[in-house]
Image (spheres, rainbow, N blue to C red):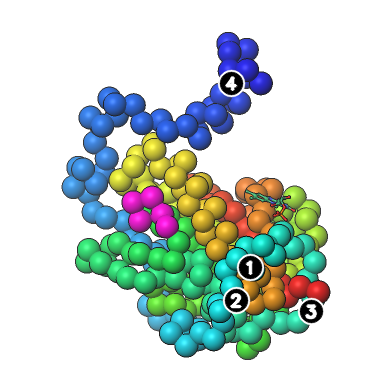
Amino acid sequence: MKNNKKTPALIARGRDFIKSNRGRKQFGEMSDQMKGMKNPLLQKDFPKDAELIDLPSPLKFEMGTAPLLEVINQRRSRRKYTDEPLTLAELSFLLWCTQGIKRIFRDGYVSLRTVPSAGSRHAFETYLLIKNVSDIKPGLYRFLAVEHKLLPLVQDAPDIFQKAAAASCNQPFVASAAVTFVWTTIPYRCEWRYRELSHKVIAIDAGHVCQNLYLAAESIGAGTCAIAAYYQDEMDELLGVDGKDEFVIYLAPVGKIP
Ligand SMILES: Cc1cc2nc3c(=O)[nH]c(=O)nc-3n(C[C@H](O)[C@H](O)[C@H](O)COP(=O)(O)O)c2cc1C
């Protein structure tokens, strides 16, 4: 479609979203960071009395030794999974590869992770729909990247996996995964510095996270498939996020492959 006067407004808006909308005049406009406003937290808060679940330490991983070229060559989107559970160590490995924190600095407000992120803003939270992971009760969890632990959110909700598949525009393989990664974004973490320039880089950053999941999953005999087709309101509701200051941006079911 040619970019002329006849370009429909919604298409034009979509195209603008992926442009670098950084006009020279925008340098004059103050971000909240420039105004001296407090740095947003690098992780969503959680109740301090919550019972967290320990994950095997990244320092002790025995995975991740497959040759990179081999893993890259075999990577593809996998939509069929076996009934074999993932081990807790494997889940820990996948979480580390996608959002693991290597270093925290500037008074606890900036993190360097296993994935790159524009300005190191890392504007994501990782939720997990766990169905078949050894030693973990099925349910909804949130990964606490700072602690490298799991925060239990919802258990005893056996229909949650079917609901997730329905909310994923009825893509049934979501319900058969051992675990589905659901990434939300908290845009203000990035907007604090980049204002209206944030949203393009948040979307790009989500791609880095999911690509690491693809490669990490392949390296342990598992597979994943990126999903961007989902019903926003249903998926936000499933996770219990407000859909405004935090909302789902991407998801990826993972399971062992035949
Ligand atoms: C941003 C993005 C969104 C996607 N959304 C879906 C989806 O909703 N459902 C699906 O089955 N596959 C989805 N895919 C997977 C693509 O269909 C797949 O990557 C493509 O067909 C190429 O196949 P390959 O990944 O095996 O190389 C998505 C991939 C990306 C990168």
**First-in-chain label (2 vs 4):** 4
Q: Mark 4 falls on what kind of element?
A: helix
Q: Which mark is residue 66?
A: 2
> Does ligand 1 reach within 8 Å of label 4's beta carbon?
no
The residue at which mark 3 appears reads as 83
Q: Amino acid at mark 4?
A: Ala
Q: Residue at left 47%, top 41%?
A: 200
Q: List the residue tagged with mark 4.
A: 9
Secondary structure under the numbered disc 3 in the rendered image? loop
Mark 3 residue crowding within 10 angstroms, few (<14) / some (14–19) / many (20+):
few
Closer to the N terminus: mark 3 or mark 1? 1
Query: Residue 43 location in percent, x, y?
Result: 39, 64
| Residue type at tag 1 | Val
Q: Per the image, is 2 magenta?
A: no
Dot 4 and dot 1 residues touching (CB under 8 Å): no
Q: Looking at the image, is mark 4 or mark 3 earlier in the sequence? A: 4
Please state the extent of the stretch shown in magenta in the rendering: 116-120
Q: Residue at x 18, y 47 (%)?
A: 36
Q: Height in image: 205 above or below 62?
A: above
Q: Nearer the viewer, mark 2 or mark 4?
A: 2
Label 2 near label 1: C-beta < 8 Å?
yes
Q: Residue 110 falls in which quadrant of the image?
A: bottom left
How far from the left and from the top, in percent, is residue 57? 46, 85
Q: Nearer the viewer, mark 3 or mark 1?
A: 1
Badge 1 element: helix
> CB atoms at circles 4 and 3 under 8 Å apart?
no
Q: Mark 4 to mark 1: distance in Å?
A: 42 Å
Residue matched to label 1: 71
- Asked whether, in this view, residue 182 is left or right of residue 80, the answer is left
Is residue 84 rendered to the left or right of residue 43?
right
Q: Split into 4 quadrants, where in the image is the N terminus? A: top right
